[in-house]
Amino acid sequence: MKRINALDASWLAVDSEDTPMHVGNLQIFSLPEGAPETFLRDEVKRMKTACEVVSPWNLKLAKPGPIGRVLAPAWVIDKDIDLDYHVRHSALPKPGGERELGVLISRLHSNHLDFKRPLWECHLIEGLENNRFAMYTKMHHSLIDGISGVRLLQRILSDSPTATGMSAPWSVGPKKKPLGLVSDTVPTLQGAFLQAIDAVKEQASSTPQLVGAIGRLLTSAVTSRAELAAPFVGPQSVLNKRVTGQRRFATQQYALEKLKDLAKEVDASLNDIVLYICGTALRRFLLEHDSLPEQPLTAGIPVNIRPADDDGTGTAISFMIASLATDIADPMQRLAAIKESTRTAKEHLQKLPRNALNQYTMLMMSPYILQLMSGLGGRMRPAFNITISNVPGPDHTLYYEGSKLEAMYPVSLIAHGGALNITCLSYNGSLNFGYTGCRDTLPSMQNLAVYSGEALEELDQLISTERSVKKPASRKRKAS
């Protein structure tokens, strides 16, 4: 049995019928050439019977009740996993399009995980048009975050289109031992004492930087400085009301190279362009619903703090907060404001040593967690208006049992006070957007996916216009 760390435990503590805390991944494959009609049925059977279930897939809560989840959360290994329950075979009415798939994923993502079992499900979905199928996998956020989830699922895939007999997702774990569940040595009193001394030394060495970082946030919040966006300074909006348990899911896909080229032209980062697209789409969406706040919306942006060689699971993120400049009508001025806000937020985070980032994250996010646990989420000013993530994924074509992976979309979580989450995942030259929202709080949420595409087209046209204006001026200077 292994106790769960504070950040992972917080996802269990705030889990409720209206706010299930699981995250998901939707993978779309094209069937191998000449695949039999029973290909997917045979594959489901093989995956259930010919594999071992490893960590974190075999972990369940020691005390699954509400009190045990909050007061003493711990993992134990489930040695008798019912794969017929966890692995499910579904079908769309043929020919199933993107809309039908989105409706099914919305329904599946709304369903709660069973706390008496390992906290995951995998659904193989056939009947997708153009000879394709989908795999939707979800797991509780206390076991996995966006980065570790993509890495875990990527490990079952192959670079070869002819590879067969491949492992099921739940038979492949992280390279390193997850969550410290198994120890190489028997713990001793002396060892525990030395570990405690090291922890105190590490915390003491980072205390001045932590105090300085929290002080800067408080100063920004009190003085309403625009340079550094702080928690709880964003406006109340329709995005920040109470949510119900039903979800709606939508997707959008863009060429990654195009986004990078646009970023280079305006001296911005890829993340700046993502925030611009999202902020512009949100501005239009809220204007159409006559609910655009006068103050700019703020975005909570998860930042990966996992070392590059760390293949473990669990949560390893910090947060920065940036303005989406939704109060600015002019597109290029909006982009400039977003760039300045993210630059300031990055500088703020970079002043902290790596060993202080977990403590900083807990200090910054604890009021948000307390909001949710106390029932005040969605009833008072939000920590930030929306969560927007950008997760790096595989940069080349991958296969599973000869089936080509065409796209991957993240399916995220929402909570009271945050009815919308936008997460991006790169794969093989594309950036795939997953929009997860509350079905009841945000009607017509899928329009955001359309508006995001139009925001990108508008930015491309504006940059092209600026480029054409600058070229004649440049030639004229050379002629003189």
Image (spheres, rainbow, N blue to C red):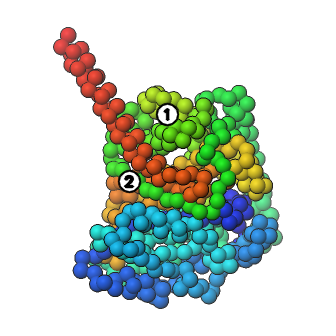
Q: Nearer the viewer, residue 357 or 301?
A: 301
**Of all residues shown, which one is farthest toward the left?**
479
Report which residue position mark 2 lands on: 253
Q: Amino acid at mark 1?
A: Lys
Q: In the picture shown, does residue 86 fall above or below 409? A: below
- Looking at the rendered structure, which numbered label has been put on residue 339? 1
**Of all residues shown, which one is farthest toward the top?**
480
Dots 1, 2 in contact, CB < 8 A:
no
Q: In the picture shown, does residue 311 fall above or below 475? A: below
Residue at (46%, 33%) from the top-left corner? Answer: 335
- In terms of image quadrants, where is residue 392? bottom left
Residue 309 point in image, percent of width and height: 51, 60
Q: In the picture shown, does residue 441 fall above or below 51? A: above
Q: Which one is in front in this view, the residue at disc 1 or the one at disc 2?
A: 2
Q: Amino acid at mark 2?
A: Gln
Nearer-N-terminus badge (1/2): 2
Badge 1 element: helix
